[in-house]
Image: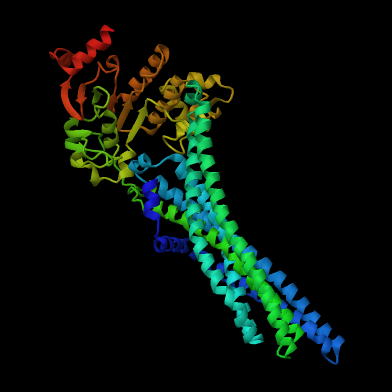
């Protein structure tokens, strides 16, 4: 986080360039947006017309046909007022419509890009931070498009339009009034830099505090089991206190800026009145013109004063956009939609590793897999065992093509993995992990995730093969039973069997079982193992296991240690190997 902040410091041009990339999402609606801008200009012009006609109203008292002149000006003011109300309505309506459609596209593309990023990206980022990007940052952009941007343009029009009118009215008084403007602008820029830095720091701290909430609520079981509620409360308090501290410090700068603005503008008003009265005394200015001048000065002063908060909000939006665009700059996987995937009707499910080596990007000096070579035939059941840290889970990630090897090759049916479409290849694989993740919907939705659009009969058949149908029938809602967040309404064995039903429904050629029964009681393990035996029939199966009793029947057992393949053979062959890792593991487990 600190490196990211350091990297962003002082790169306003780069941040601005990233912000302009938002135009891509506004572009389809640029016609509506342009009309909205026209209405905004007309509304601002109507604002500028009021002081002039109010001044004319005062001067009308000196005309011969006083009542006719007053009525004429009142009619013009009424027309301007109605016109302003109409154009303001359509301006707001158009800006809101464009904003909602633009941000809908932005949310969709952000999620679409995010979900296609490789696993390595999610290993570097936290869920709370990414969720904050999609929710908080895009909500901030909504306020910018609907309010802040319009307010910024309106104030710019009022400032420059008002100054132009003042120059026409009285150049001498205008130059006198403008003597304070450069100072105000310098202050706005100076304080704006501080406001932006504190706004960015606050955004980062808010994202961090949201991460704490998300993680603790997701892991509430562990929080309570370890009696760490007050530890988490203290951790969240520390973050939110930092948010408050930064907010108050930023408020101090904004307050100081506002105070200077109030002092400067009221001082300018007094000075302008004094100078105006002098000009009136010399017959160089009419009372109505002085009144208009004061109104314009107030308008201009208010707009300049309001620029501080508008500028701060724009800086927040630029920071939010920069964070979003950083996500878009991440390279995504080359995935294909269902209809665009290459059909693989003759895919057998054979795979082979040839001298494959791999290190994680954040640990380039540590070989997690080192010169790994073995071949798995179609329909073969292979078990992978070894001590913790041997590289078993990384091997699973490599077969799923979550990472690319540093050296060596991964082949499927004799062809390099890179020759296949990634989505088409993963279509023929399924994983049943130890820690099953179920979505918070119904059992039906979780099973059909293996084959979206599957029929009722297919789902029931898969549940029966997974030994899950018996307990599903016991629920009053059956397949429509809600499983709760991460499947908490189901037992461990039930979650495993739902996951197996999902894999059965997918009907993969390659099946990966990652410690699928290690966390279950004996009865659940028997039911799950029976379901797995049915699932593995006729499929190429790779079983990751710590408990060797579950892999004795495998066609071959691969023993890994420190990322290397150190032993290979059947259970009977490996158990006879003197001082072998497999023999030592067997003695430890079975003797115990």
Vertical placement of 153 versus 315: above or below? below
Foreground residue, 63 or 121?
Answer: 63
The answer to whether residue 553 is left or right of residue 330 is left
- Image coordinates for residue 559, horizontal then vertical, percent: 20, 23
Residue 391 shows up from this direction: yes
Residue 47 shows up from this direction: no
> How did the renderer colour the structure?
rainbow
Q: Quadrant of residue 575?
A: top left
Foreground residue, 272 or 476?
Answer: 272
Q: Outermost residue toward the top? A: 591
- Image coordinates for residue 500, horizontal then vertical, percent: 40, 26
**Which residue corresponds to the image point at 39% horizontal and 12% vertical from the top-left?**
522
Q: Quadrant of residue 414?
A: top left
Foreground residue, 163 or 409?
Answer: 163
The answer to whether residue 535 is left or right of residue 291 is left
The answer to whether residue 102 is left or right of residue 414 is right
Q: Outermost residue toward the left? A: 578
**Which residue corresponds to the image point at 62% horizontal and 71% vertical from the top-left?**
40
Q: Outermost residue toward the bottom? A: 64
Instruction: State which quarter of the image contains the N terminus.
Output: top left
- Image coordinates for residue 427, horizontal then vertical, percent: 34, 39
**Which residue corresponds to the image point at 38% horizontal and 33% vertical from the top-left?**
506
Vertical placement of 513 versus 195: above or below? above
- Image coordinates for residue 177, horizontal then vertical, percent: 62, 78
Q: How many marks?
A: 0
Foreground residue, 156 or 411?
Answer: 156
Instruction: State which quarter of the image contains the C terminus.
Output: top left
């Amino acid at each position: 986080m600190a490196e990211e902040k350091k990297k962003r410091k002082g790169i306003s041009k780069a941040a601005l360039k990233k912000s302009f990339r938002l135009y891509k999402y506004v572009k389809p609606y640029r016609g509506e947006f342009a009309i909205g801008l026209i209405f905004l200009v007309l509304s601002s012009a109507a604002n500028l017309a009021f002081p002039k006609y109010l001044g004319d109203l005062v001067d009308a008292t000196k005309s011969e046909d006083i009542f006719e002149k007053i009525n004429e000006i009142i009619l013009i003011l009424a027309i301007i007022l109605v016109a302003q109300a109409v154009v303001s309505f359509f301006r707001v309506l158009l800006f809101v419509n464009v904003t909602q459609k633009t941000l809908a596209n932005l949310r969709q593309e952000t999620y679409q890009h995010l979900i296609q990023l490789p696993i390595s990206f999610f290993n570097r980022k936290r869920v709370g931070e990414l969720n904050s990007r999609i929710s908080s940052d895009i909500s901030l952009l909504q306020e910018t498009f609907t309010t802040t941007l319009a307010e910024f343009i309106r104030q710019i029009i009022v400032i420059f339009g008002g100054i132009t009118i003042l120059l026409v009215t009285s150049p001498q008084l205008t130059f006198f009034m403008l003597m304070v403007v450069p100072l105000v602008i310098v202050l706005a820029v100076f304080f704006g830099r501080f406001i932006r830095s504190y706004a960015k720091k606050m955004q980062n701290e808010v994202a961090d505090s949201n991460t704490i909430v998300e993680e603790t609520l997701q892991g509430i079981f562990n929080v309570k089991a370890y009696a760490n509620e007050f530890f988490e409360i203290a951790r969240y308090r520390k973050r939110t206190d930092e948010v408050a501290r930064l907010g108050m410090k930023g408020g101090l700068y904004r307050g100081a800026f506002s105070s200077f603005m109030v002092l400067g503008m009221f001082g300018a008003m007094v000075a302008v009145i004094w100078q105006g009265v002098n000009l009136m005394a010399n017959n160089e200015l009419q009372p109505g013109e002085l009144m208009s001048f004061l109104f314009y000065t107030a308008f201009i002063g208010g707009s300049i004063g309001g620029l501080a908060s508008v500028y701060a909000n724009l800086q927040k939006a630029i920071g939010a956009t920069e964070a979003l665009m950083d996500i878009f700059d991440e390279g995504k996987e080359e995935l294909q939609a269902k209809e665009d995937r290459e059909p693989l009707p003759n895919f057998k499910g054979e795979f082979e590793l040839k001298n494959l080596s791999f290190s994680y990007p954040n640990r380039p000096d540590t070989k997690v897999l080192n010169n790994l070579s073995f071949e798995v035939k179609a329909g073969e059941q292979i078990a992978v065992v070894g001590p913790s840290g041997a590289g078993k889970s990384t091997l699973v990630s490599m077969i799923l093509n979550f990472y690319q090897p540093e050296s060596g090759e991964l082949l499927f049916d004799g062809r390099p993995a890179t020759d296949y479409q990634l989505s088409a290849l993963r279509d023929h694989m399924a994983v049943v992990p130890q820690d099953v993740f179920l979505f918070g919907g119904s059992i039906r939705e979780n099973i059909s995730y293996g084959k979206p659009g599957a029929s009722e009969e297919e789902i029931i058949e898969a549940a029966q093969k997974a030994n899950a149908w018996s307990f599903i029938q016991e629920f009053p809602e059956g397949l429509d039973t809600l499983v709760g967040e991460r499947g908490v309404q189901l037992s461990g064995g039930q979650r495993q069997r739902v996951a197996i039903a999902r894999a059965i429904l997918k009907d993969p050629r390659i099946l990966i079982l990652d410690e699928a029964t290690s966390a279950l009681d004996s009865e659940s393990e028997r039911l799950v193992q029976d379901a797995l035996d049915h699932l593995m029939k006729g499929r190429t199966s790779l079983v990751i296991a710590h408990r060797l009793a579950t892999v004795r029947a495998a066609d071959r057992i691969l023993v890994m240690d420190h990322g290397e393949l150190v032993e290979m053979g059947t259970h009977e062959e490996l158990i006879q190997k003197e001082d072998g890792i497999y023999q030592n593991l067997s003695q430890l487990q079975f003797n115990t």
